[in-house]
Amino acid sequence: MSAPVRIAVLAGGVGGARFLRGLREAAARRWPDGDGGTTAAITAIVNTGDDAWLAGLRITPDLDSILYTLAGVNDEQRGWGRVGETERVSAELAEYGIGWPWFTLGDLDLGTHIARTSMLRDGLPLSAASARIHSRWPLGVTLLPMTDDEVETHVEVDDPESPDPDQRIRTMHFQEWWTRYRASLPARRFVQQGIETATPAPGVLETIEAADVILLAPSNPVVSIGTILNVPGIRAALSRGAGRVIGVSPIIDGSVVRGMADACLTAIGVATSASAVALHYGARIAGGLLDGWLVDSADNQAVESLAAAGIATVARPLWMVDLEKSAAIADAALELGLRAR
């Protein structure tokens, strides 16, 4: 019997969650295990730069969004949190002036945060605490935080409320910029506090180096995938690994699929286009990351130019409107990644 196919995915946020759900389905169709699952080993390395301490609890938005989606308990209408949520605890905390009034946590979600924080206080690293939490549901995907160290993304902006024009530079947590201001304050730069001394969580480098194919989910290229890549050792592991690195564009026809990734790209001087993001990652043969890239059919004109730059590019419909479409996108990425094996 041949060894199971090993798939590594770099992911964050709702885009990463929906892509992983589609990938799990695509893998079950390609390599069925006879029980509705797959013999393939899928491991997702998840961004933790959005994490924060709030009301004494450690919040991990990307890990939890992906967890809830794969477990089938996410709120599809809102795109985040648990289905059937109530918010009594957050309302009570607000009465005491605790927490962020613009960042509401549901009661079921708070249960996850309390459990995680209790484990962290008991001395478990984030990866071990996450494994215990994730074991509650049969996910079909192993989720690894990018690091056990605390890394938090902060955003440097011009503060329009400052009366002194010489004192308008303000730094805020990414969640405040993203959730409270909806990325409306132009970002000067992103500061990933703690990233320089962070180390990859156990299993992260080994997963990347042993993978038959490595997929970059259609997550935010700057604050999700970019943060993962900035953990010392991860980018080098991608270069060393034998598996082809295939990315899925989060930009369709010049617009973001979800969220405000365009504001993040503007801050680092990258145009909001499928080809610009691919070139931002760079061709692996030229010292970058990508062997292949999926663009939407609307961006078919980018295929030839990206191929000339050393990135094998395929155009397919990329809107993840349902499980079937998401599985088709993931299968196209797998096809491109496994083509040369």
Image: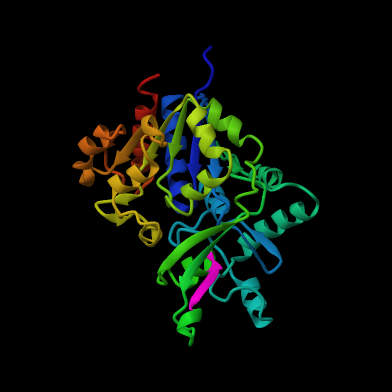
Q: Main secondary structure of the magenta part?
A: strand
View extreme (left): residue: 301
Q: Give me the residue at 28% from left, 45% from top.
A: 275
Residue 33 x %, y %: 51, 24
Q: Is residue 243 above or below residue 111?
A: above
Left or right of residue 316: residue 155: right
Q: Give me the residue at 62% from left, 41% from top.
A: 200
The scheme the figure's colours follow is rainbow
Q: Is residue 21 above or below residue 263?
A: above
Decide if residue 172 is in sight here.
yes
Residue 306 x %, y %: 26, 37
Q: Is residue 55 above or below residue 279?
A: below
Q: Nearer the viewer, residue 297 or 140?
A: 297
Q: How many marks?
A: 0
The span picked out in magenta is 168-173
View extreme (top): residue: 1
Task: Answer with the quarter of the image where residue 290 lies.
Answer: top left
Decide if residue 71 is in sight here.
no
Residue 175 x %, y %: 53, 65
Q: Quarter of the image containing the C terminus? A: top left
Q: Nearer the viewer, residue 285 or 25?
A: 285
Q: Give me the residue at 27% from left, 39% from top.
A: 316
Q: Nearer the viewer, residue 31 or 251?
A: 251
307 inside magenta stretch: no
View extreme (right): residue: 122
Left or right of residue 193: residue 181: left
View extreme (bottom): residue: 163
Q: Give me the residue at 54% from left, 33% from top.
A: 237
Left or right of residue 94: residue 158: left
